[in-house]
Image (cartoon, grey):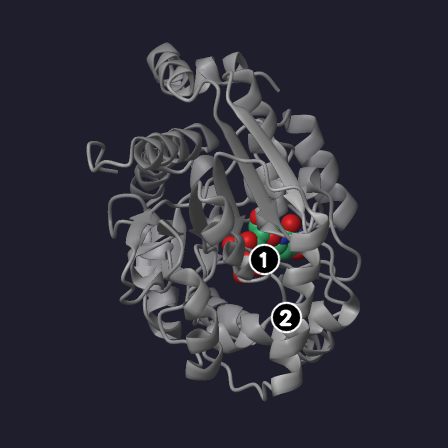
Amino acid sequence: MRITDYEPIVGRSSIEELRLLGSKLSGKIIQNINSTSVGGGVAEILNRMIPLLQDLGVDARWNVIKGNPDFFQVTKKFHNALHGRKEAISEQDLAVYMETNRGNLKEMDLYGDILFIHDPQPAALVEQKTQMGKKWIWRCHIDVSRPDEVVWQFLKQFIVRYDAAVFSAPAFSGPLPIRQFLISPSIDPLSDKNRELPRDIIDATMRNFGIPQDKPIITQVSRFDYMKDPVGVIRAFELVRKHIDATLVLVGGGAADDPEGEKVLAEVKERAGGNRDIYIISGQARTDIEINALQRASTIIVQKSLKEGFALTVSEALWKAKPVVASAVGGIPLQVKHKITGLLSHDVEGTAYALRQLLSNPEFARSLGENGKEHVRQNFLLTRHIRDYLLLFIALDHNEDMINL
Ligand code: UDP
């Protein structure tokens, strides 16, 4: 992709602004560091963003730290503990974390003018700052507002050495003695997950899954995880079905390698029982085009989570101009403005009520979808994300509070 490919979507002036901002960073190297080059949202965003930054004339680069399975086991525990889950973290775990970070410091070339460090795994690389100076940013993609204190205190000794920290939603952070920025993640409107699809691809996908399109389709796309409350979605659907004929689709491919996912899936299947209006798509991971087609074929998209990160599925649905019914948790309220860009719900009954409201009032549903699409265009596309990052880099590079994000 080239940056000009985005011009028809966001307008020429947005692209010109990006070029202008990019030019202010000429001669500066932005070095991104994370822990994986494939899989996961961070890698996906970097994969799409780095070439566009380069196209804007910004010398953005990306390196990945090395770690053995022990290290990733420890950082997985960190991840859960930062989300507030109880995890037994031993001295040995902390030692493995430090050893890996210090080992990487020995092997890696840290050459950036701005070091852009993503998530907890490589956070301790900042130890090098004392010696090399430069600007350091910690980009946190997870909600650390109610962390396990042991892990947080351990990590915090590194975080406070950064020049700034970036979070995805206001509620995701807590008090820190360094500057904090709010930068939401984004979706790429030109990726296979989100680009426009011809009707025949959508129809073929639905045929493939055996889902009839003669009734309104209500869909939730989510990993089979208790926090996504798929059983709650079925209960809401059953309430709706007492009044209105409709089809429910639960999509969550790729659950097989997650033991908890299998358990949730089994409960979902049991709860759905013999209901022939409920389609459960699980098993192998689905392609981005399939997910795109399923979202586009839907009449309403639901995201009935009990807890959420930013909830990219909601941005994906809104971008497709779908009316959305979603819980008011995590990053969802940033995206769904109640009765403007979708409907917020708080429980099973509320979800059922909102679904009925939309099914019986297609005009209202359509206007929510249209507004939602515009809201995403303004706030949650990759180009806005790039703009925020460029402003952040410039602000830090100038080391002044001139630019207020
Ligand atoms: N997703 C997918 N296939 C599935 C379930 C989810 O491709 O079977 C994608 C979904 O389209 C979205 C991402 O996984 O892009 C989930 O991101 P989100 O922030 O909504 O939730 P998370 O899973 O990170 O909690």
Viewer-nearest residue: 228 or 15: 15
Residue 97 tag number: 2
Q: Residue at x 44, y 27 (%)?
A: 383
> In the rendered image, which quarter contains the N terminus?
top right
Viewer-nearest residue: 79 or 59: 59
Ligand 1: give its quadrant. bottom right
Viewer-nearest residue: 106 or 47: 106
Q: Is residue 202 above or below residue 10?
A: below
Relative to residue 379, is residue 29 drawn left or right?
right
Determine the residue located farthest toward the front in the rendered image. 131
Name the kind of residue labelled 2 in the image: Tyr
Image quadrant assignment for residue 378? top left
Q: Is residue 145 above or below residue 31?
A: below
Image quadrant assignment for residue 76? bottom right
- Residue 394 placement (x, y as % from top left): 34, 30
Name the kind of residue labelled 1 in the image: Pro
Secondary structure at badge 1 equals loop
Earlier in the chain: of badge 2 and badge 1, it is 2
- Residue 147 placement (x, y as % from top left): 42, 76
- Residue 347 placement (x, y as % from top left): 36, 73
Residue 185 seen anywhere in this rendered image of the structure: yes
**Residue named by callout 1:** 122
